Image: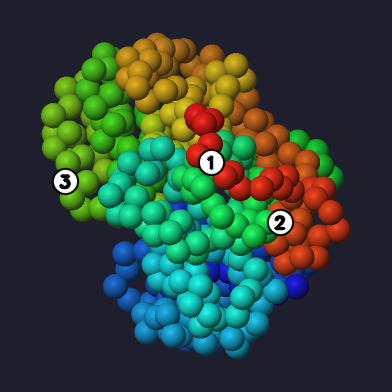
Amino acid sequence: MTILVFVPYYLPGFKSGGPARSIANLVAHLGTDLHFVIATADRDSGDPGPYPGITPGARHRVGGAEVIYLSAAQRRPAAIAALLRELRPDAVYLNSFFSRPFSLSVVLQRRLGRIPSVPIVLAPRGEFSPGALQIKARRKRAWLAASRALRLHRDITWQASTALEAADIARAMGRVEDDGRSRVVVAPIIASPEPPAAGRVRDAATPPRRRKEADHLRVAFLSRLSPKKNLLGALQILAGVQGSLEFNIFGPIEDEKYWRACRVAIDGLPANVRATYRGAVVPDQVPAVFAQHDLFFFPTLGENYGHVIREALAAGTPVLVSDQTPWRDLCAAQVGFDLPLDRPEAFRATLQTCIAMDAASFADWSARAARYAWAHASEAGTVEASRRLFRLAAGTAGGRAGAEATPIATEPHGTTR
């Protein structure tokens, strides 16, 4: 079965964050069972030129998938329609609801009859979380209204990574007059690019860690620098912290206007908090970066998974995150903290606790964090749920076992995150 994947950016790019990693992990686990053809931009996010050594429009073998890197001209609607007619896939996998040119182009052209009526799986990748919908809200509301009015998504399969995201999808789409084939399927994100050995919890080999200094906290923020990731919120919380804290910021600058506001906040921090921008980090260096820090601070407005959270834990670095991710009840596991965004004082109190924590206690939290990350990667059924997702969408699944499938709501869903 051939799955044509449209994703804005893919390997060897890394600046776009989680979606490329999610697809790469999916291919690593299912590339021998399913034929993945990935259509993506010929450059990384924000880069002025294409990747070296690629031929736009040609097929390149990357891991277990064929990747077609498309130039700007090849990403126009007519070229995308021609690609679909040429490949005749069993299913199309869209990785975004709002992205141009791929997702909008495919659903519009299918509605107009310009491309074959191929089954579509759409993964919104957290775009329907309350926090994400607050960003450029007017534009997003307009596109959601147009989608509903034109019934563009009336017969697709939605992938939700968690039950919380399923509720977000149903709430965002509202009333859908479908033909009985629209559904939301919960198929969790595959956490790791490598299968766990014999189903056992891996004893993670983490990089050598620095010893936590007494009454000092070394904190990392590692993500794209954009409003959704909430670096500005993190800086505002830090402004009220007492004690010695070093805050290192890693990641590509995605939004220059937002970054300027962050720079103003950095300049206004008290003398006891030292914040420094360290630039983007290539994926191979991420574990070592986390290993040099005592805590990962990430008060994101919303994540459907949060690969970077798992990366921090796998490196033995406890995390302090918002409650807008699937990573919950972290304090009970003694691997981190997940707190509501409307309680900045709780974040500050937690940071104070971490500053005061001694080296021995923090070493215990670090060891538990690494084990927790690999136990999460070993959850049974995750890979099978993704396999069933595509078979269900393409009409080849023998029933509904594996992935959890439910009809899309006919009224806005009342569940809150």
Q: Residue 190, percent across and down?
A: 65, 49
- Residue where numbered disc 3 is placed: 260
> Mark 1 or mark 2, which is nearer the start of the sequence?
2
* Label 2 to label 3: alpha-carbon separation: 42 Å
> Disc 2, disc 3: CB below 8 Å?
no
Q: Nearer the viewer, residue 80 or 315?
A: 80
At 63% from the left and 25% from the top, the residue drawn is 368
Q: In the drawing, does residue 149 fall left or right of residue 306?
A: left
Which-is-in-front pick, marks 1 and 3?
Answer: 1
Q: Nearer the viewer, residue 318 or 401?
A: 401
- Residue where numbered disc 2 is placed: 389
> Disc 2, disc 1: CB below 8 Å?
no
Is residue 371 visible from the viewing direction of this image?
A: yes
Which-is-in-front pick, marks 2 and 3?
Answer: 2
Identify which amino acid the numbered label 1 is placed on.
Answer: Glu
- Residue where numbered disc 1 is placed: 411
Identify which amino acid the numbered label 2 is placed on.
Answer: Leu
Q: In the drawing, does residue 407 fall left or right of residue 252?
A: right
Residue at disc 1, secondary structure = loop
> Mark 3 or mark 2, which is nearer the start of the sequence?
3
